[in-house]
Image: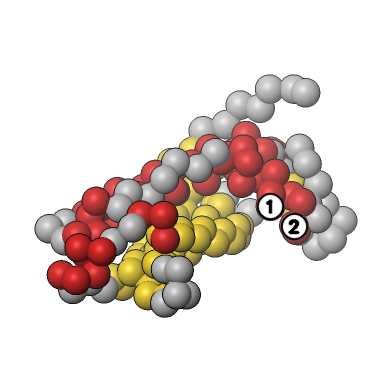
Amino acid sequence: MSNIEFSLRLNKVKIDEFNFKEPDDSFINDFNEEFLKIGLGLKITHNIDEEIIGIHLNIIYDYINEDEYKIKLIEFKGLFEYKINNLKNIISDNNNGGVNIPNVILETIIGLSISSSRGIIIAKTAGSFLNKLYLPLFNPSDLVKNLLKNDNLEEN
C-alpha cells in the first residue's frame, strides 16, 4: 500500500441540534452507568470541486434500565467540514456514482470530528450531572471498516 500525503484544515463546525435533559434527583441517586447506551451515527458528504469532505455526526445518550424505561439524556447532531488540499487527485470514482476516499483520510477526519463532538458535549453540559458522562473513545479504523462493510464501499 502506498503512502498518501495530504493536508487538511477544519473548514466549518455546525451544531445542527443539541438537546439534553437534566434528570431529577431521584434519577441521579439511582443512576447506574450500565444502563447508559451511547449511539453514534455517521454520514459522509463531499464537494470535490471545493475540496470539502463533511462528517455528519449524530450522538445519542439513552438510558434504558432493566424495566426498559428509556430516557434520552443527550442528543447531538453536528457537521464538521474539512478542506483537503488537492482532493481531486487523492480520490477516485467508485463506479457507483460515488467516490473512494482513502481510509487514512476518513480515519483522520472521523477521529477529529468525534473528539470535537466530545468537547462540545462537555462544554454544553457544564454544571450538570450529565457533564460526567464522557463520550467514550472510538477507534476510527473500526468505524471506517464498518462503513465499508455496511455501505458496500471499496476499501483504499
Q: Amino acid at mark 1?
A: Leu
User: At which x and y percent is residue 26?
Assistant: 19, 71
Q: Give the residue displayed 78% in from the left and 41% down from the top.
A: 155
Q: Amino acid at mark 2?
A: Asn
Residue carrying label 1: 147
Q: Residues within 10 Å of mark 1 (few under 14, many from 20)?
A: some
The quadrant of the picture occupied by the N terminus is top right
CB contact under 8 Å: marks 2 and 1: yes
Q: Does residue 12 appear in the picture of this structure? A: no
State left or right for residue 33 relative to residue 93. Answer: left
- Which label sits on residue 17? none
Q: Give the residue displayed 51% in from the left and 33% down from the top.
A: 7
Q: Nearer the viewer, residue 15 or 6?
A: 15
Q: Give the residue displayed 75% in from the left and 58% down from the top.
A: 151
Q: Nearer the viewer, residue 109 or 59?
A: 59
Tell me, what colour scheme is on the image?
Answer: secondary structure
Asked if residue 126 is positioned above or below residue 88 in the image, the reply reads below
Q: Residues within 10 Å of mark 2 (few under 14, many from 20)?
A: few
User: At which x and y percent is residue 81?
Assistant: 47, 54
Residue 46, located in which quarter of the rendered image?
bottom right
Q: CA distance from mark 2 to mark 1?
A: 5 Å
Circle 1: element type: helix
Q: Nearer the viewer, residue 130 or 8?
A: 130
State left or right for residue 107 relative to residue 16. Answer: right
Instruction: Identify the residue at the far top of this view.
Output: 2
The quadrant of the picture occupied by the C terminus is top right
Circle 2: element type: helix
Residue carrying label 2: 150
Q: Give the residue displayed 44% in from the left and 41% down from the top.
A: 137
Residue 22, located in which quarter of the rendered image?
bottom left
User: At which x and y percent is residue 39?
Assistant: 50, 60
